[in-house]
Amino acid sequence: MQRTRSQEVLVHPATPPRSGPDRRSFLRFTAGAAALLPLTALAGCSGSRDANTIRIAFQQFGSGTIKQEWISTAAQEFSAENPELVVDLVPIVAAENDYFTKNELLMSSPRTSPDLVYEDSFILLSDVGAGYLQPITDLVEGFENWDDIADASKEAVTGEDGEIYGIPITTDTRALWFQREVFEQVGLPDDWQPTSWEEILEAARAIRDSDSEAIPLFIFAGTPQGEKASMQGFEMLLYGTGDGTGLYDKDAEKWVLGSQGFIDSLTFLKTLFEEDLTASTAQHLDPNISESIYTSLLPDAKLGILLDGSWISQNWGEGAGRPWPEWTDVMGLADMPTQDGGGTKTVTLAGGWGLSIPEHVTDREVAFRFLEKLVSTETLVNYAIADNHITVRADVAEDERYRSYSPAVEYFTQLLETAYYRPALPAYPEVSSAIQEAMEAVMTGSTPEQAAAEYDAKVTDIVGSENVQEAS
């Protein structure tokens, strides 16, 4: 039975039943059969927390267990080295926006707060501003792999106060994935590389007008898709319009309003719906549509073009929800072009995730010790391969296993050279929500101009009129 949003729950690994008197021996590594525990029940727990238990919260995507396996393996090693300590896994099964909300609810109380949290770089400074996370600058001073982390990733976890609030682990880039079986059926080239938005639309129209049953093009859009809509969708368009400043003008330290590029990006999205070049509005507003895309639409040749990230082939590996070894031959990759092929000619957005310590940690030094185990070179090489992500660490990137784990890793890694990054500011998550609302407004009938004006008003309310400027 499918859950409604109001029924979404946390999946909390249950402790196996005791078969003997030594309770500690069963809790050193508390991973087992998953038990469903309502969020309200977890938030209402009473009693003091066990100082010897390290609780780590992270997002679990649908039926995927890659993160859980990464943490579980490190937890087993850590518990063997520290028999007095327990690692308690708290995977949060939720859509993207709901994960952030549930994670923040957990961190808000000393009774329920994790000791480590898996944080998206785009939400981190907002969580810092809300008082959920504490600085770890002093702990980082003794972290031997800090110098291996890319400078841009270090900046993403550094607050406006100059303090460090996380250890970056992953990054990512985005491009156009295209299904070669669909392209062959339609007569599109095997080495397709569009040089403008119009050429993307031309390919989508060719699929629409053919005998193929495939959805021509899918771009994540609308509020149920959360940050995927903002980053994989809208910003991959906006940063290719040539406006230069994008969402935020760093030099002026102001958010940009009235941008023609913003309207043009919404117009592109509007065109997809008006010309029947994409999935239905209902499909776009399904928070679980990504799982359908990866496990059925692409493998079954029911989707022609997808604008998405570097990591998605993890869905097709051995042991995944839909093993698809043929993907390496069937799926093609093309750079996302700028609007008219000018400027940098192509565009990509980069982001990433890391680990942070909440304000209400039980023992920050112990939590950081486990964090170091989670981000050891060997552990992160294995995690990158399993998770199909791009590393932010030079020591990991130098490992031959990493360099050869996927036929796409070299392609997506080289895109980082010209990648744009989201504004790493506390207000960004709210601005991102306004972007998603603008996209959804266009999808459901508003004109791009109306949706852009509503966005401008919302951003002004969010950041204040003194922190915005009209696009030049």
Image (cartoon, rainbow, N blue to C red):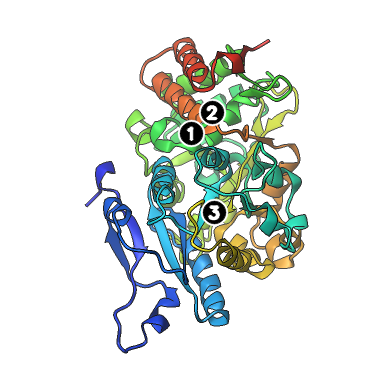
Give the alpha-carbon distance from disc 1 to disc 2, as whole Å: 6 Å
Height in image: 86 above or below 206? below
Three-letter amino acid code at the position of disc 2: Phe
Residue 313 is tagged as 3
Q: Secondary structure at mark 1?
A: helix
The quadrant in which residue 161 appears is: top right
The CA span between labels 1 and 3 is: 19 Å
Verify CB contact (< 8 Å) between mark 2 and mark 3: no
- 345 or 61, which lies in front? 61
> Residue at position x 43%, y 37% from top?
225
Rendered residue at 60%/33% (across/down): 425
Query: Which amino acid lies under the numbered mark 3 shown in the image of this protein?
Result: Ser
Quadrant for the C terminus in the image:
top right
What is the crowding at mark 1: few (fewer than 14 residues within 10 Å), some, or many (at least 20)?
many
- Are the residues at dot 1 and dot 3 in contact (C-beta closer than 8 Å)? no
| 1 and 2 marks in contact (CB < 8 Å) | yes
What residue is pinned by disc 1? 229
Q: CA distance from mark 2 to mark 3?
A: 22 Å
| For marks 1 and 2 on the same chain, the one whose residue lies earlier in the sequence | 1
The kind of residue tagged 1 is Ala
- Where residue 440 appears, x then y in whole percent? 40, 24
Q: Which residue is mark 2?
A: 234
Left/right of residue 314 with respect to residue 350 in the rendered view: left
Q: Position of residue 294 (x, y in %)?
A: 45, 49
343 sits left or right of 110 in the view: right
Which residue is painted at 40% across and 71% down in the image? 31
